Image (spheres, rainbow, N blue to C red):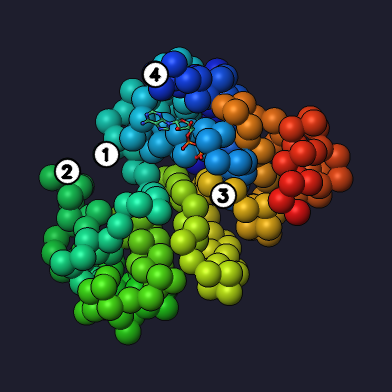
């Protein structure tokens, strides 16, 4: 799905959190939003997810006015660090959850939901965990389950907010490689937020560098590395390399 964002602004209280975002995302692209904490990355992702509302601007997906659609009609899959799994549900039920709350008419039968969950668990290599509860899983396993839950609805757009933020470095590296495989297999247009340059550059087709509610630069990893477009990008790259 292509995404076209134009002139998007958002203000909380007296702070301008997004100050005019223009961004085009190609169908099937894996895009990283990279920037320091507080630069507006999560807010932009939440607006695309329908969890926040912009003050001004346009958002089109495949030419369709995305803001005019009800959130459940957008078919967004998201993995946000703080949207935890349901602790009282098994892995299989967590993955099937998104399907079980679809509006009547779109909702599959219980048997179909279980079959879809089984298919996803095999794909994500967590089929051996089907009957476990989240409390019995490692952090990396939980993130796979969260991704399975997001993928279950066959999302038109997949949004990931610091998906590996809470995990240690070795697990993050494994999951990155694995996420790229998932992306190649599903072909979903995917946007993920990170403040970690290595993560952005290793995973993404293009990287969007954000600072203080603006897009400072959009490009391939090499271009951003070799030719920072603004003093902000140069500082940010230097600060965390
Ligand atoms: P990032 O993801 O880049 O860290 P965020 O989008 O989370 O940035 O936040 C950008 C700014 O907006 C921060 O200053 C944050 O405090 C503020 N902010 C985010 N959500 C809210 C909210 N619900 N109410 C008030 N301020 C918020």
Residue in view at x 53 percent, y 69 percent: 168
Seen as rendered, the residue at the extreme right is: 226
Residue 6 relative to residue 83: left or right? right
Where residue 198 sits: x, y (%)?
A: 68, 57
Query: Residue beneath label 1, please?
Result: 72
Residue in view at x 17 percent, y 50 percent: 101
Instruction: Mark 4 or mark 1: name the one nearer the start of the chain.
Output: 4
Please, what secondary structure does the residue beneath circle 4 have? loop
Instruction: Mark 2 or mark 3: name the one nearer the start of the chain.
Output: 2
Q: Confirm or reject: label 4 Cβ below 8 Å from ligand 1.
A: yes
Where residue 65 sits: x, y (%)?
A: 41, 24
Q: Quadrant of ligand 1?
A: top left
**Closer to viewer: mark 4 or mark 1:** 4
Please identify the quadrant where the C terminus is shown: bottom right
Q: Residues within 10 Å of mark 3 (few under 14, many from 20)?
A: many
Residue in view at x 32 percent, y 28 percent: 69
Please, what secondary structure does the residue beneath circle 1 have? helix
Q: CA distance from mark 3 to mark 4?
A: 25 Å
Q: CA distance from mark 2 to mark 3?
A: 32 Å
Instruction: Mark 2 or mark 4: name the one nearer the start of the chain.
Output: 4
Residue 157 relative to residue 137: left or right? right
Please, what secondary structure does the residue beneath circle 3 have? strand
Q: CA distance from mark 4 to mark 1?
A: 28 Å
Query: Which residue is more in the foreground, 62 or 170?
Result: 170
Q: Is residue 143 above or below residue 4?
A: below
**Closer to viewer: mark 3 or mark 4:** 4
Tell me, yes or no, whether the two marked residues, 1 and 2, touch with CB atoms within 8 Å. Answer: yes
Tell me, yes or no, whether the two marked residues, 2 and 4, touch with CB atoms within 8 Å. Answer: no
Query: Residue beneath label 3, please?
Result: 194
Q: Residues within 10 Å of mark 4 (few under 14, many from 20)?
A: few
Instruction: Mark 1 or mark 2: name the one nearer the start of the chain.
Output: 1
Query: Which residue is more in the foreground, 13 or 113?
Result: 13
């Amino acid at each position: 799905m292509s995404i076209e964002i134009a002139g998007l602004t958002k203000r909380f209280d007296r702070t301008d959190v997004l100050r005019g975002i223009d961004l085009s995302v190609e169908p099937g692209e894996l895009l990283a939003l990279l920037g320091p904490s507080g630069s507006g990355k999560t807010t932009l992702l939440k607006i695309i997810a329908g969890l926040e509302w912009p003050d001004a601007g346009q958002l089109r997906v495949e030419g369709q006015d995305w803001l005019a659609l009800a959130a459940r009609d957008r078919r967004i899959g998201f993995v946000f660090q703080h949207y935890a799994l349901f602790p009282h549900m098994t892995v299989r039920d967590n993955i099937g959850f998104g399907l079980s709350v679809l509006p009547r008419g779109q909702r599959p039968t219980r048997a179909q939901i279980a079959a879809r969950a089984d298919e996803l668990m095999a794909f994500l290599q967590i089929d051996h965990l089907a009957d476990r509860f989240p409390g019995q899983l490692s952090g990396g396993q939980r993130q796979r389950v969260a991704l399975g839950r997001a993928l279950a609805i066959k999302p038109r757009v997949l949004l990931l907010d610091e998906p590996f933020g809470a995990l240690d470095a070795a697990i993050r590296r494994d999951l990155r490689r694995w996420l790229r495989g998932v992306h190649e297999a599903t072909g979903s247009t995917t946007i993920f937020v990170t403040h970690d340059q290595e993560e952005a550059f290793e995973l993404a087709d293009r990287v969007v560098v954000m600072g203080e509610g603006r897009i400072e630069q959009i490009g391939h990893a090499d271009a951003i590395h070799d030719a920072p477009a603004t003093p902000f990008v140069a500082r940010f790259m230097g600060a965390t390399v």
